[in-house]
Image: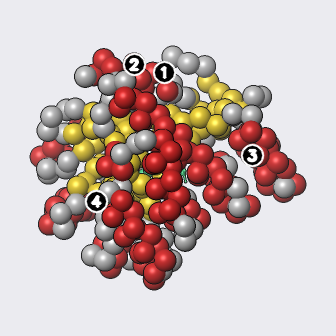
Amino acid sequence: LVREKPGSNFHFFSPDILTTWKNTFNLEFSLRKALKGNQFELHYQPQKDIKSGNIVGCEALLRWKHPDKGYIPPDHFIPLAEKNGMMLELGEWVLREACRQNKKWHSTGTYRGLIGVNLSARQLHQPELAEKVKEILEETGLSAEYLELEITESATISQNNEVLNSLRQLRELGVHVSIDDFGTGYSSLKYLSIFPISKLKIDKLFMKQEVQHNQAIVKSIITMSHSMEMKVIAEGVETEEQLVFLEKENCDEVQGYYFYKPLPLQEASELFLQAQ
Ligand code: C2E
Ligand code: MG
Ligand code: MG
Ligand code: MG
């Protein structure tokens, strides 16, 4: 059961159908059809600067609007697309669409912040990643400083020179790179000092205050980010209590249901206009 936006219908989809897809290789076919048939869309979740309260960024989140099954969340098809090789194509669509939309917002004065785009592991390990990103920025006219690529920690990243090269090239272009779901992956501390990272996104897992030590972990991540000249954003902020704590600890930015859910294009545009 997935509830996409407040007040809208509930969308049902059956995980069984997804299992069938996986087993019969039909998913690849369906994904291709979906890409051709414009069944993918991006929703946008605003990010706030804690001090000013201004919306300074938004994260583009992929949605598959299936004609029969309604919205299918990314966790249900991205891992499969990653396996069958579709993810490169899909990821490129996301990147282009996000840059195009952000450029449009900027040109019309609707919004002046950055857009966060999630990169899959495959995309990150693509040797021509920086080249691709450069092409898309040129094509859409978005200036690099308004794009932030979110990567997740994985065991292979820290030992991979190709990834390091890509990240350095991206940094040279002026693109920001953040680490998503920070604190849940591998070897984070080792490569933080090597990789050109501009922001850490604290995983929403650590917002659970009732779990012992979570607040201590959040505090340490914030302190460490700042001493390494990185910004830090908390994901999954759902309560005022969490916000107050993050404010007290000098966290830079927040993102979560307490402020906004990921919004469909129209709603995001309206919000941005009205928030100015
Ligand atoms: P993520 O990048 O960590 O994105 C944040 C997820 O947390 C989103 O789930 C968002 O809807 C959800 N979220 C935001 N605020 C809250 C909150 O306050 N509480 C809770 N419980 N959840 C919150 P979503 O949209 O279902 O995306 C799930 C994951 O799928 C993303 O996690 C990301 O890893 C992946 N994903 C989404 N879009 C893309 C994409 O275009 N490309 C790639 N490679 N991965 C994507
Ligand atoms: Mg993300
Ligand atoms: Mg995350
Ligand atoms: Mg994630």
- Is the Cβ of the residue at disc 3 closer than 8 Å to that at disc 2? no
Q: Quadrant of the N terminus?
A: top right
Q: CA distance from mark 3 to mark 2?
A: 30 Å
Q: The residue tagged with tag 2: helix, strand or loop?
A: helix
Measured from the top left, where is residue 138 in percent x and y? Answer: 46, 48
Indicate which disc, 2 or 4, sits on the residue closer to the N terminus.
4
Which kind of residue does numbered mark 1 sit on? Gln
Q: Left or right? Give the position of 183 relative to 62.
A: left
Which kind of residue does numbered mark 3 sit on? Leu
- In the picture of the structure, the residue carrying the numbered disc 2 is 270
Q: The residue tagged with tag 3: helix, strand or loop?
A: helix
Mark number, residue 31: 3
Q: Residues within 10 Å of mark 1 (few under 14, many from 20)?
A: few
Indicate which disc, 4 or 1, sits on the residue closer to the N terminus.
4
Mark number, residue 59: none
Res 79 visible: no
As rendered, which of 229 and 167 lies closer to the eye? 167
Measured from the top left, where is residue 10 in percent x and y? Answer: 61, 24
Measured from the top left, where is residue 23 in percent x and y? Answer: 84, 57
Q: CA distance from mark 4 to mark 1?
A: 30 Å
Ligand 1 under 8 Å from disc 1 Cβ? no
Which kind of residue does numbered mark 2 sit on? Glu
- In the picture of the structure, the residue carrying the numbered disc 4 is 198
As rendered, which of 211 and 143 lies closer to the eye? 143
Query: Residue drawn at (74%, 61%), measured in percent from left and top?
Result: 84
Mark number, residue 266: 1
Indicate which disc, 3 or 4, sits on the residue closer to the N terminus.
3
Indicate which disc, 3 or 1, sits on the residue closer to the N terminus.
3
Q: Left or right? Give the position of 4 relative to 11.
A: left
Count of residue discs: 4
Q: CA distance from mark 3 to mark 1?
A: 24 Å
Q: The residue tagged with tag 4: helix, strand or loop?
A: loop
